[in-house]
Image (spheres, rainbow, N blue to C red):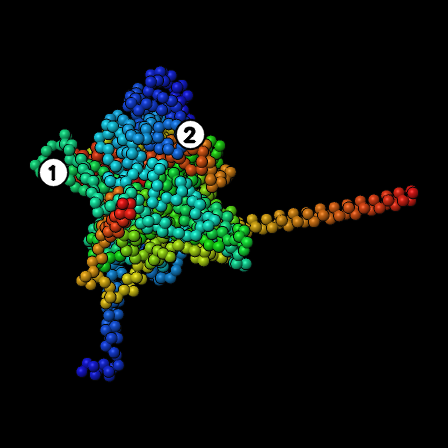
């Protein structure tokens, strides 16, 4: 029967699902993007500009973001605002792991994006994207509140382009967890331990 | 400089005789002291000569210094001031050999040496015998190497000094990552195998000290606060021993924002360091610039700063101070649970001051405004008009409003009075400075004790508060901001015309081999720069004596015996900025 | 009286609430009409303090700096940059990379072939602009630079960095006027110099002519003498 109706009206099944999901997506994305709660967590100078963005003059609440949560469990967005040092890195990755999906990461400022002016330093991670996935990069040192908000709008743009049908966080097998780096003689990324050990073994064998 | 030996000899003719066995020689105005006599000399300076304030302790690695090839590789320099008399410093240094660098610790005489000696152990690997807790402070236990040593190379090491040759004229872009084996900023010891690696155990000594605390019948627990915590002002970590809710011990874990300021600073040219100093205490970038350019100008005797530039420097520094104090009060109240309202009001004023900074220098926060021999840009009529409007009407009103909101507020009084008491004696011993020191009733303000720039021309009061508690520090800040407004009024009234820069210096200046320590009264306390030059365009040693870092020495003493919620506001009342604590 | 301090404080907050509320009421509907307004907040701004980016923007002062830009002449299309490399040497973050161009026989010429600024490390300090002797690198005011990708989006090449002089004149009206003034003075001085040189040449010529005449006359005289 339904097939008949369909052929009569001329809307193919696939498209019909599409209309439904487009509407659903619109609602889903609208609600997500207008209440993106950031983690209340700042690292360095950029955090002060983030605070300024939250304060009266720029007022992040116009984007539905004023609820800065100190607990990562209740937030959707992590603004990595400032220099990521090696000593802080495991904590950041832990915070990221504790955030529920869907979670987003903004790398605010030159430091979080690519190490910034301190890139050469022995205790500085040259870009948080080496360890956790980043959605929006905001260059500048520090980004002015306006450019941070421009980053928010970029993030909203990204959110709106996602569809509930293919986002991966409803997938059972998906965790998105990032292994927490270990502070050894330097930062050890657990994902690279086999490769490192192998290199050492090979070198030793070559010597023998 | 009155710190030079001749001046000292003139001042204390018997000094030399008394100490002749201890002193080996003199170099660039610093006495070289035998390591085993170090404590005796320090004690003598403190007890007999009134040099009670150990401002700065810095390590130096002499490995590459052209004039110090013959001497022992490591040395530690100590700068002493007198809080009573004011005036210039007396500096002594002791040397340690390369194989087994050990020196006696000064902590028993000057508790302020605690963090600074730990920093030297961490970054230079110099051991201090008799130090109560010689752990790494900025890096983590287990880190490979001592990075401030001159032969330590970072993963992205290109050349000893900037500018790097790879940038020009054949500057084909290669990211630093692509040049390193792990495609990342990592250095591992040779043949390091992570599968067979064991993390070292770390033991925090908290909860030991309960002499003055009456025992409760509760469990003793250790609570970890930070590094991600809304009231640690950034990424500070406190490990607190608790008996019930009472703090029995407190240990700090720093370094979560250790950005290698000094290592990078030694690779940089003198000029390149100016924008880096902006990022030390990122709330008060103007005063950081100020301190740094004064420090370098001290080593460049020929540079003359025009009058207008001197006034502009003072104007910017005092605007910064007023802004910083408002900001600090706002966030102190945040810690107390007055969520956001006071800090929102404070940030409003801050935004307007930042507007002025932006007009003058181009950036809101990272001003990069001062240069050797002047300031980078002039300000126009309109700017001065706006500044006068701000200083005469807006800021006094904002301070009144802040006081109306807080000063007599009963909740505020209940939370802050008699909390976090620091006695004047302790305040000096722990090397605190700025509002913390003066909040304990010690009248020591570098602007008065050793006037730099043109501070001797202004009429302002040295503010002290007798309370020594959190409330006293709050009042200090309000009253000091009012004094800043007073200075600003005078400076804006007298602002002369003329150029803001003498003969512009080239982008690379060579500075003859020398060394000096220069300090200014930054909003948070004594900000000092210790610079050793070796005749090249790059500083040989560049050390920052950060007020927040040294002030933190006193936190444990203040917090023990109080409730844990008070520990948080005591931390807030010190007013730290992590960029400066960890550098 | 216990509690009077709290009441006083509440009075302050109440004042803030009412002023901003009244401000808001007054500014309806213009404030919410959208569009693109540029705002300059006065120093005694009270009440409604918010700038509603992106509909409203703050006035940026001329010296505002964000990331560098390279200026080329809008008329001739020629870069001002002569590849002297000073900006690369002065840059504290060492994020400027320049390849100097060569002519076919391998001699360096004052032009850059490649020019990169790694925006992901640039600290926006403005030293490059301050020390450029040719006024060819300046700080851009454009702060809306966020992207989804770091590589290659945030390594700006010459194309991304280049802006015409017209754009520069718009951003930096004061500096541009000064620059024009300096150029004009320079041209004037040059002309003056040229004129003076011409006059001198003329005088010389006249003098030479005269000398020749005298000489000829003298010669004539001497020949008659003979
Ligand atoms: S990008 Fe600049 S402002 Fe931001 S944290 Fe890094 S140094 Fe500070
Ligand atoms: S603004 Fe500063 S960091 Fe950026 S390119 Fe110019 S000199 Fe380098």
- How packed is label 2: few (under 14 Cα within 10 Å), some, or many (20 or more)? few
Screen quadrant of the C terminus of chain C: top right
Nearer to us of marks 1 and 2 is 2
* Camera-nearest residue between C7 and B7: B7
In what element is the residue under mark 2? helix
Tell which subunit mark 1 falls on: B
In the image, residue A39 above or below residue B322? below
Give residue A162's position: percent from left, percent from top: 27, 64
Tell me, yes or no, if residue A43 can be seen here.
no
> Ligand 2 closer than 8 Å to the CB at disc 2?
no
**Residue drawn 37% across and 41% down?**
B264
Q: Residue at x 20, y 43 (%)?
A: B198
Which mark identifies residue B67? 2
Q: Which mark is residue C219?
A: none
* Element type where label 1 sits in the image: strand
Mark 1 and mark 2, same subunit?
A: yes
Q: Is residue C170 left or right of residue B31?
A: right
- Closer to us: B499 or A56: B499
- Relative height, residue B395 to residue B71 (above, below): below
């Amino acid at each position: 029967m339904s097939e008949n109706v369909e052929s009569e009206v001329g809307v193919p099944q696939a498209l019909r699902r599409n209309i439904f999901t487009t509407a659903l997506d619109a609602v889903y994305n609208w609600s997500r993007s207008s209440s993106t709660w950031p983690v209340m967590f700042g690292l360095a100078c950029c955090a002060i500009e983030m605070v300024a963005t939250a304060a009266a003059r720029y007022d992040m609440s116009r984007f539905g973001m004023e609820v800065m949560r100190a607990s990562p469990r209740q937030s959707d967005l992590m603004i990595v605002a400032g220099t990521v040092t090696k000593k802080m890195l495991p904590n950041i990755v832990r915070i990221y792991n504790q955030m529920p999906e869907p979670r987003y990461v903004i790398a605010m400022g030159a430091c979080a994006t690519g190490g910034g002016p301190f890139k050469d330093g022995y205790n500085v991670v040259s870009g948080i994207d080496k360890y956790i996935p980043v959605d929006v990069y905001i260059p500048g040192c520090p980004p002015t509140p306006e450019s941070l908000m421009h980053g928010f709008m970029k993030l909203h743009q990204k959110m709106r382009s996602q569809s509930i049908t293919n986002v991966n966080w409803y997938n059972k097998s998906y965790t998105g967890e990032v292994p927490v780096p270990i502070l050894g003689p330097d930062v050890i990324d657990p994902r690279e331990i086999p490769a490192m050990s192998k290199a050492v073994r090979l070198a030793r064998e070559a010597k023998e | 400089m009155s710190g030079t030996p001749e001046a000292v000899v003139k001042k204390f003719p018997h000094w030399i005789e008394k100490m002749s066995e201890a002193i080996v020689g003199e170099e660039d105005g610093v006495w070289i002291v035998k390591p085993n006599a170090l404590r005796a000399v320090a004690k003598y300076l403190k007890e007999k000569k009134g040099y009670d304030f150990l401002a700065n302790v810095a390590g130096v690695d002499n490995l590459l210094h052209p004039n110090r090839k013959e001497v022992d590789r490591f040395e530690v320099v100590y700068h002493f001031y007198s809080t009573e008399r004011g005036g210039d410093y007396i500096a002594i240094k002791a040397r340690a050999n390369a194989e087994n660098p050990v020196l006696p610790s000064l902590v028993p005489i000057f508790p302020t040496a605690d963090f600074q000696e730990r920093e030297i152990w961490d970054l230079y690997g110099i051991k201090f015998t008799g130090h109560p807790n010689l752990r790494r402070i900025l890096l983590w236990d287990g880190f490979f190497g001592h990075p401030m040593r001159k032969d330590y190379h970072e993963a992205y090491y290109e050349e000893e000094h900037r500018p790097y040759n790879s940038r020009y004229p054949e500057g084909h872009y290669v990211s630093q990552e692509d040049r390193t084996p792990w495609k990342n900023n990592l250095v591992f010891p040779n043949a390091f195998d992570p599968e067979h690696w064991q993390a070292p155990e770390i033991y925090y000594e908290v909860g030991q000290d309960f002499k003055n605390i009456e025992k409760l019948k509760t469990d003793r627990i250790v609570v970890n606060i930070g590094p991600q915590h809304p009231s640690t002002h950034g990424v500070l970590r406190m490990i607190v021993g608790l008996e019930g809710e009472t703090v029995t011990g407190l240990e700090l874990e720093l370094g979560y924002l250790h950005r290698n300021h000094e290592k990078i600073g030694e690779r940089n040219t003198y000029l390149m360091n100016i924008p880096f100093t902006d990022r030390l205490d990122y709330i008060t970038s103007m005063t950081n610039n100020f301190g740094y350019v004064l420090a370098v100008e001290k080593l460049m005797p020929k540079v003359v700063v025009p009058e207008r530039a001197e006034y502009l420097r003072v104007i910017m520094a005092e605007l910064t101070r007023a802004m910083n104090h408002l900001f600090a009060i706002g966030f102190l109240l945040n810690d107390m649970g007055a969520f956001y309202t006071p800090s929102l009001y404070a940030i409003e004023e801050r935004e307007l001051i930042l507007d002025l900074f932006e007009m003058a220098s181009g950036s809101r926060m990272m001003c990069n405004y001062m240069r050797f021999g002047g300031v980078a840009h002039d300000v126009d009529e309109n700017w001065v008009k706006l500044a006068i409007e701000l200083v005469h009407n807006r800021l006094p009103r904002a301070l009144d409003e802040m006081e109306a909101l807080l000063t007599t507020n009963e909740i505020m009084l209940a939370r802050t009075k008699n909390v976090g008491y620091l006695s004047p004696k302790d305040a000096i011993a722990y090397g605190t400075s700025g509002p913390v020191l003066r909040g304990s009733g010690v009248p020591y303000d570098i602007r008065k004790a050793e006037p730099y720039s043109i501070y001797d021309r202004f009429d302002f009061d040295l503010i002290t508060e007798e309370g020594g508690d959190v409330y006293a520090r709050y009042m200090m800040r309000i009253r000091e901001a009012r004094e800043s407004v007073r200075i600003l009024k005078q400076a804006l009234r007298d602002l002369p015309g003329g150029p803001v820069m003498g003969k512009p210096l080239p982008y690379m200046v060579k500075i003859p081999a020398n060394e000096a320590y220069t300090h200014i009264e930054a909003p948070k306390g004594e900000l000092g720069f210790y610079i050793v030059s070796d005749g090249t365009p790059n500083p040989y040693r560049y050390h920052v004596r950060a007020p927040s870092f040294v002030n933190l020495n006193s936190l444990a003493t203040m917090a023990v015996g109080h409730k844990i919620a008070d520990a948080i506001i005591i931390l807030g009342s010190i007013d730290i900025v992590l960029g400066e604590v960890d550098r | 009286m216990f509690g009077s301090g709290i009441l006083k404080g509440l009075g302050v907050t109440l004042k803030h609430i009412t002023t901003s509320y009244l401000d808001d009421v007054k500014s309806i509907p213009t404030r919410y009409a959208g569009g693109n307004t540029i705002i300059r907040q006065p120093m005694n701004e009270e009440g409604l303090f918010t700038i509603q980016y992106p509909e409203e923007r703050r006035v940026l002062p001329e010296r505002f700096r964000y990331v560098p830009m390279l200026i080329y002449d809008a008329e001739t299309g020629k870069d001002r940059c002569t590849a002297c490399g000073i900006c690369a040497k002065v840059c504290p973050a060492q994020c400027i990379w320049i390849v100097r161009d060569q002519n076919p026989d391998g001699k360096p010429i004052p032009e850059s072939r490649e020019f990169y600024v790694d925006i992901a490390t640039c600290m926006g300090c403005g030293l490059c602009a301050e020390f450029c002797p040719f006024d060819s690198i300046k700080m851009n005011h454009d702060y809306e630079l966020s992207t989804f990708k770091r590589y290659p989006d945030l390594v700006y090449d010459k194309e991304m960095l280049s802006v015409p002089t017209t754009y520069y004149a718009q951003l930096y009206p004061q500096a541009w006027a000064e620059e024009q003034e300096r150029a004009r003075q320079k041209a004037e001085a040059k002309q003056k110099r040229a004129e003076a040189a011409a006059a001198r040449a003329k005088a010389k010529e006249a003098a030479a002519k005269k000398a020749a005449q005298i000489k000829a006359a003298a010669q004539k005289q001497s020949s008659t003498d003979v």
